[in-house]
Amino acid sequence: MDAILQARMSASRLPGKVLMPVLGRPILSHNIERIRRAKTIDRVLVATTDKREDDAIQRLCESEGVPVFRGSEADVLDRIHGCMKQFGMERCAKLTADNPLIDPAVIDQVTGFYLAHPSGYDYVSNNHPPTWQDGQEVEVFSAAALEAAWREAKEPFQREHVTPFIWDQPERFRIGNVARADDRWYRDYRWTLDYPEDYAFVKAVFEELYPAKPAFSTDEVMELLRRRPDIHALNANRAGYVWYRDHLDALRTVAGSGHLKQG
């Protein structure tokens, strides 16, 4: 299965975050390396925007041997659809460059579930509802499902977040979720990259674990945080945020979810 990693330089809270340095390499380079370690992923592609500032992402990807698709900045659904079309994909795993600590084993768990049921699902993820640490999100979907979303989705948040049109219609699409036993890890831990304190957290984790074991796992990060609560505290105040809390009036399958942090 191919993986599409969506990435861009512009970000209102942390501009240029995907190319910020960690251990002498851009974060995006580490992200690509970790996705490539997943056994179920045959090829990683990056879908970035057609803005000039994202030329830097294309240059990095070319140096890493990663194919690049460039498209709309705001209409990410159109960008991912165009990438799938250009590279002839019948299905793909979608990941985001906000999540450089993505665990290859978690990718394999989600994509493996999808592959084990080849005609059973249109969409499988591990975040509806969210139970993993924020930053371990994986989505897998068929080209047919994405084509329907691309043709029919009208709301700006549906175009920006790519898949809500699909996962919010379980009566139309066959939806699967790979969940943990409880959501404590999601509510208490934040491993994604959106604020300066998130960068401090990601940088600290890589500096502690990567030199001895580049392929460090989710469990090893958790053990580090138990030993070093100061690292966990760097961005713990932002744990539990869900983007769709601002769209509960438009979404049908998450309204009133106990997973939403209102602070």
Image (tube, grey):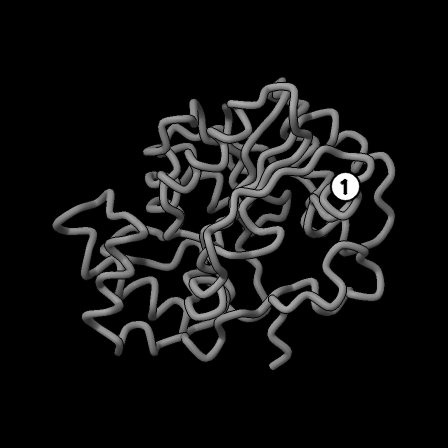
- The residue located at (63%, 18%) in the rendering is 88
- The residue located at (29%, 61%) in the rendering is 222
Q: Quadrant of the C terminus?
A: bottom right
**Could you say where residue 89 lies in the image, as x and y percent from the top left?**
61, 21
Circle 1 packing at 10 Å, graded few (<14), some (14-19), many (20+), is some
**Could you say where residue 151 lies in the image, as x and y percent from the top left?**
85, 34
Residue 117 drawn above or below residue 236: above
- The residue located at (32%, 52%) in the rendering is 218
**Could you say where residue 74 lies in the image, as x and y percent from the top left?**
72, 52
Q: Residue furthest left?
A: 212
Q: Would you identify the image quadrant in which residue 93 lies?
A: top right
Q: Nearer the viewer, residue 251 or 162?
A: 251
**Could you say where residue 84 lies in the image, as x and y percent from the top left?**
64, 27
- The residue located at (46%, 53%) in the rendering is 181
Residue 83 drawn above or below residue 72: above
Helix, strand or loop under label 1 = loop
Instruction: Give the side of residue 3 with respect to residue 231, left or right.
Output: right
- Mark 1 sits on what residue? 170
Give amino acid for label 1: Pro
Instruction: Give the side of residue 229 with respect to residue 71, left or right.
Output: left
Q: Would you identify the image quadrant in which residue 62 lies?
A: top left
Q: Nearer the viewer, residue 194 or 72?
A: 194
